[in-house]
Amino acid sequence: MRIRPAEPFELPLLQDIERAAGEPFRSLGMTAVADDDPPPLGELERYRKAGGLWVTETEDGRPVAYLLTEPVDGAAHIEQLSVHPDFARRGLGRELIDHLAALATAGGRCALTLTTFTEVPWNAPYYARLGFRALGEHELTEGLRNIRSTEAAHGLDRWPRTCMRRPL
């Protein structure tokens, strides 16, 4: 499988990946997360045009995973990482993160950051295995505080969440 920038015509496919990737949250009683709409096409296009939308494609060129990123306070912030469940547990998420780490290092970024659910096995525990650590409240940058505020307004704080950081 190959990682590459997303193409405009693929954006609806990425929404389908997001919907499928949300389904496992249902088994944890997180139906609001499972039922949450994927990023709108305009938002995906904004990330794509800015160079912050990467996909992993199959041999036939079909995207099966994607990563949204943008700079936040000197770090490359992972806004979204989604892998279609049919392709889960193959290292695709890790490969996308490693790809971003290489790009971020070359671009002079100091770290990767993200926000995630603390008690979802494929969220905070997974990212910890990839070298991320949870940040204390006193370690949050202004940008991360703004992201968390937006998430809270969206209702994501119904479940424990954290900001995480992986130095580069």
Image: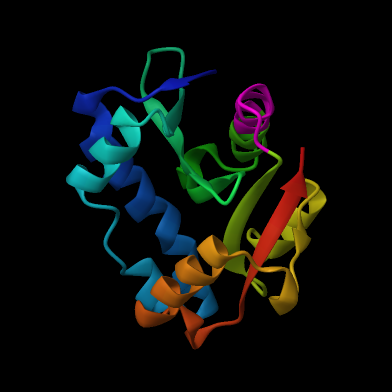
Percent position of residue 154, x then y: 35, 77
Residue furthest to the bottom in view is 158
Q: Write the residue at 29% across / 53% down.
A: 39
The answer to which image quadrant residue 155 occupies is bottom left
Splitting the image into 4 quarters, where does residue 153 fall?
bottom left
**Percent from the top left, x then y, of residue 22?**
42, 60
Question: Residue, x 44% and y 80% (percent of image)?
Answer: 152
- Location of the C terminus by quadrant is top right
Q: As rendered, which of 134 and 126 lies closer to the eye?
A: 134
Residue at image coords 48%, 86%: 158
Residue 66 vertical placement versus 127 (above, below): above
Q: Report which quarter residue 34 is drawn in.
A: bottom left
Is 14 covered by the magenta stretch?
no
Determine whether, in the image, residue 94 is placed left or right of residue 50.
right
Q: Which residue range is magenta in the image?
A: 99-109
Against 123, is 92 above or below?
above
User: Residue at the location (54% across, 76% down)?
Assistant: 28
Measured as percent of width and height from the top left, residue 95 is found at 64, 30
